[in-house]
Amino acid sequence: MVSSRRNSGVIPREGSVRDWSEFVDPSPSPKLLYSQSYVAMRGLLASVASMDFFLLSSKLKSAWAAMTSQRTTRSTERSRSKGSSCKRIAVHVLICFMVGIFIGFMPFFSVDVAKKIVSENERLPFHEGVVERQMMDTNVKELETVVVEKEVELIDEPEVEESPPVPAMLDDEVAFVESSPAVPAINELEIVAKKLLIIVTITSVRPQQAYYLNRLAHVLKAVQSPLLWLVVEWPEQSFETAEILRSSGVMYRHLICKKNTTSVRKIAVCQRNNAIYHIKKHRLDGIMHFADEERSYTGDVFEEMQKIRRFGAWPVAIHVGTKYRAVLEGPICKGNRVTGWRMDTVQRKGVARRFPIGFSAFAFNSTMLWDPQRWNRPPMDSVAVHSGGRGGLQESRFIEKLVKNDRQIQGLPDNCNRVMVWNFNLEPPLLNYPKGWSLYKNLEADIPVT
């Protein structure tokens, strides 16, 4: 206690010269031992900080005592010693401040750096033992996965007998395979979209109806789609017609005309106008043709209809009189351009027609019925079949609403030199026939089986 007071707490007398060396800590400063561990570095910094703290405290105490004891006498030596002590104090304060800042950025928890470095080295990818162990673990897992998959396949797969070996091809077979031409690839740009064919047929229940409709249905069934068959019946939908259409294999719509009249011409006008109204209402876009059931058609005429842009016509063979004569009626063409007309001079004699053809000799674009502005026609000009006019004037007046002149008509086929439609009058006289061509009476056998 006494020695400590003498060394640190004794107040010097006035006029005495103080030896500031006594305030210097005689203990040697610890050496900074540099190591690779984090703990050694932190211990060094802590020791330096603790040393500076005690040294600073002792310096501050001695300085304060010196300042209070020698206020009256100010000698040159004391001023020099006081200036040097202040510089030392300032240096120590600065060092302590820097050390404190450095310690403040350190983590507040202790870390065993040596163990951490060792654990990190064990997981480094370039460590030989780690690499070999990881590769072995990966290979074992892959082998286990493959074995499990093979076992599942063997369990799930049924037993299949091995197929016999395929015999080798002979020399002539190899030569045939090598010489066979390769099938060219299909180019999507070469596939042309076909237009919808709208075929309108008017019909009624009579003895020859089944024959006519079945014959026309077989022809339409062979035509490439798309095709829509509009069948308009008078005066109601009969069971016979519905059965024929249902078994035809052609996409159809069964319409009716309920006009109360006995005139065959007015009934036909009503049926055709109903079909035109149906196309206008549903805005069907395609090539429209009035295919009468009494006509005989080839499949080529429907293929030629796909070429029509606005209006097309072709020649028709017509049966004339009782002498079994056949005449041609239709356009005369040079290529696809119409240059004249053939007409039936026997039946149409004395009748002046602008376009001397019947309904079975032309087809047109159905948009002309419901989109007149597309074809530069008056918007209020309605296209319909009128009951007035005899001797072919009905067809001619209907065509006049669709085209203005012969240059707007396209002749089919090229040069119009092939007949594809025939009009033969095969309608028998009135006769009695079983309804639906089903027999329920008079089934007794004339010659019984013995």
Image: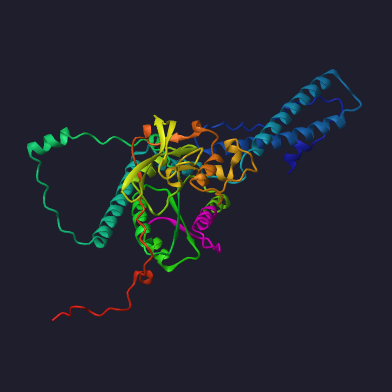
Instruction: Residue 181: tell me if it is visible.
Output: yes
Residue 426 in percent (x, y) is at 34, 55
Choose top left, top right, bottom left or bottom right for residue 169: top left
Q: Is residue 370 above or below residue 233?
A: above
- Quadrant for the N terminus, please: top right
Tally of numbered discs = 0
Residue 399 in percent (x, y) is at 52, 41
Of 360 and 104, the residue lying toward us? 360
Measuring 45% from the left and 34% from the top, which residue is drawn there? Answer: 410
Q: Is residue 269 left or right of residue 122?
A: right
Residue range corresponding to the magenta coloring: 249-274
- Quadrant for the C terminus, please: bottom left
Choose top left, top right, bottom left or bottom right for residue 107: top right
Q: Is residue 420 left or right of residue 26?
A: left
Membership of 371 in magenta stretch:
no
Q: Is residue 372 above or below residue 140?
A: above
Of 396 and 412, the residue lying toward us? 396
Of 78 and 198, the residue lying toward us? 198
Residue that extends furthest to the front in the rendered view of this protein? 350
Residue that extends furthest to the right in the rendered view of this protein? 72
Residue that extends furthest to the top in the rendered view of this protein? 76
Q: How is the image coloured?
A: rainbow
Residue 183 in percent (x, y) is at 26, 36
Q: Is residue 386 left or right of residue 299?
A: right
Instruction: Residue 134: tell me if it is visible.
Output: no
Membership of 257 in magenta stretch:
yes
